[in-house]
Image (spheres, rainbow, N blue to C red):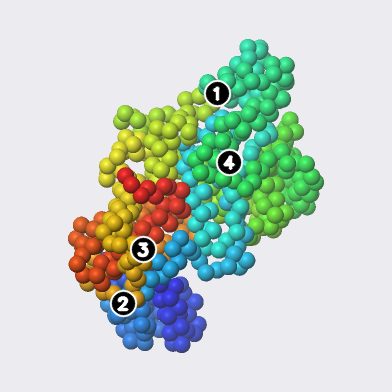
Amino acid sequence: MIELIKTMIADITRKIAPNFKGEILVEIPENKEHGDYTSSVAFSLAKVFHKSSSAIADELAKKLKSPEFSKIEAKNGFINFFLSEECLKHQLKEILKKKNKYGFSTLQQAQGKKIQVEFISSNPTGPPTIGNGRGGFYGDVLANILETQGHKITREFYVNDRGGQILALGRSIKLAQGKTLNLEKTELDNLYKGNYINDLAKQIDENLSVEEAGQEAVDLILNTYIKPIIKKFGINFNIWFSEKSLYKKNNYEKVMKDLMQKELIYEKDGATWMKTLELGDTKDRVLIKSNGDETYFMSDILYHLNKFEVRKFDKVINVWGADHHGDVSRLMGALKILGIDLERLKIVLIQFVRLVSGGKKAKVSKRAGTFITFEELVYKVGLDAARFFFLMYSNDTHMDFDMALAKERSQKNPVYYVQYAYARLCSILRKAQISKPKSQTKSKLQITNYKLFTENDLNLIRKLIEYPEILSDIAKTYEVHHLPRYALELACEFHNFYEKERVITEDKNLTSARLALVMATKIVLANTLNLMGIKAPDKM
């Protein structure tokens, strides 16, 4: 509906202001007295015509006409749109017709973009933590939503299987096996601890070198702690991309040659540096250490050139932890100088999670072995609660994960509240099936001729038809938290409807209409939960 309104306004605007290039904003107002939709375009046009926004809004409102709206009015410079009852009924029919495809874009996948979503990508030096879980669920659901909009999605996990962390892991294994190592203080500080290190040490041959032990530990961690756990929690990757593979071809030499030709490389203290300060970073960065090892920065450049130049993704979305915020500007600068259009890259930073337990915040450190694993958290609160709680917060805000609330089976718990609404919808439809002969089941949901008598009925439809717009917006903004919030709002609207209206009545037409509305609500709520990877229980 928002796109329809934008098109209507754009058509009129082109006639009266053909050179207008401003954005046409259309929103859903919180106060329904301001319509089902409202636009502030008159404020932008006021600058073009040097007239008041109120005068322009009045002029536009008189010219805007469509059978979908019972009224289009100008008020205080805004243009307010009120949906007609016939339009609401038609949208209800669309939901019942499209079912689990309702909300999907009509864009064919061949027309959609080839998009890579790279997420989690936790270092393979230990089990996934709760922070990895937040980014994991975010990336998974974002990929689901992008698919509904006709895009071809590749879900990818980047495996950091080389470098200093592998040596640190190998040293940790050897010490756990009782071996004596002459380590410097910095090497001791970087060791990994925890019961999982002792478990790995028992499985790895004691005669292996430090590097060999580290590499074998990586394989064990991936296949024991990471891949099975991630799959168990409903996240499936198309590709597990090895960092080591970046150095098997001549990509490395090509990039270094390009950077040298652009005079962005210099030697200092035995290391190879890149002039990232000139590219917007806070200082220059090392590409190759004095010992000959390439840095993460070098690998990041190679990895992203592989994404854009080799695999030719139209769009790349990186879901990173907030601790990588310093890597953004240097990577962007390097890619730009190497000819990559930065519009093709989006880096989403996921803020930290603090686990609240017994009123205290638990400290998490993978190296110290004091972390709480992703698996442990899900086991304690349940997968549905874990997903919903992580998803309902904007990725740019810190969150306290309240374990007590996540485990509570009451309407204070948001996921329970939503699932209870779905179970109630199923209960109503079961009751309707029992209360009428089977021969009448089909006719009950026929909505060719029916009436909805109250504003509660219509408000529920209004909330239902926001669903496609929510998906479309998230596919553009990547703000996934709007989906669980929509689920809560829809559940609230349904509970309000249920408390104030009877579904099964003596009036056959009204009963038919209300059952159709219940069925449509069930469809949309199930679709919403499914995209979030959360169960839609028919009983609770």
Q: Earlier in the sequence, mark 2 or mark 3?
A: 2
Residue position for label 2: 449
Categorize mark 3 by other alpha carbons within 10 Å: few (<14), some (14-19), many (20+). Answer: many
Secondary element at tag 1? helix
Q: Amino acid at mark 2?
A: Asn
Q: CA distance from mark 1 to mark 3?
A: 48 Å
Say which quarter of the image contains residue 84: bottom left
Q: Residue at x 37, y 38 (%)?
A: 401
Depth check, mark 1 against mark 3: the one in front is 3
- Tag 2, which secondary structure? loop
Q: CA distance from mark 4 to mark 1?
A: 19 Å
Q: Nearer the viewer, mark 4 or mark 1?
A: 1
Question: For the residue marked with disc 1, what is the amino acid?
Answer: Tyr
Whether residue 56 is visible to the viewer of this picture, yes or no, is: no
What residue is rendered at 61% in x and 68% in y? 111
Q: Nearer the viewer, mark 2 or mark 3?
A: 2
Residue annotated with mark 3: 520
Distance of mark 1 from mark 2, alpha carbons? 65 Å
> Which residue lies under the disc numbered 4?
121
- Looking at the figure, which quarter contains the N terminus? bottom left
Q: Residue at x 64, y 43 (%)?
A: 240
The answer to which quarter of the image holds residue 466 is bottom left
Label located before the other in sequence (4 or 1): 4
Q: Amino acid at mark 3?
A: Ala
| Label at residue 196 | 1
Q: Nearer the viewer, mark 3 or mark 4?
A: 3
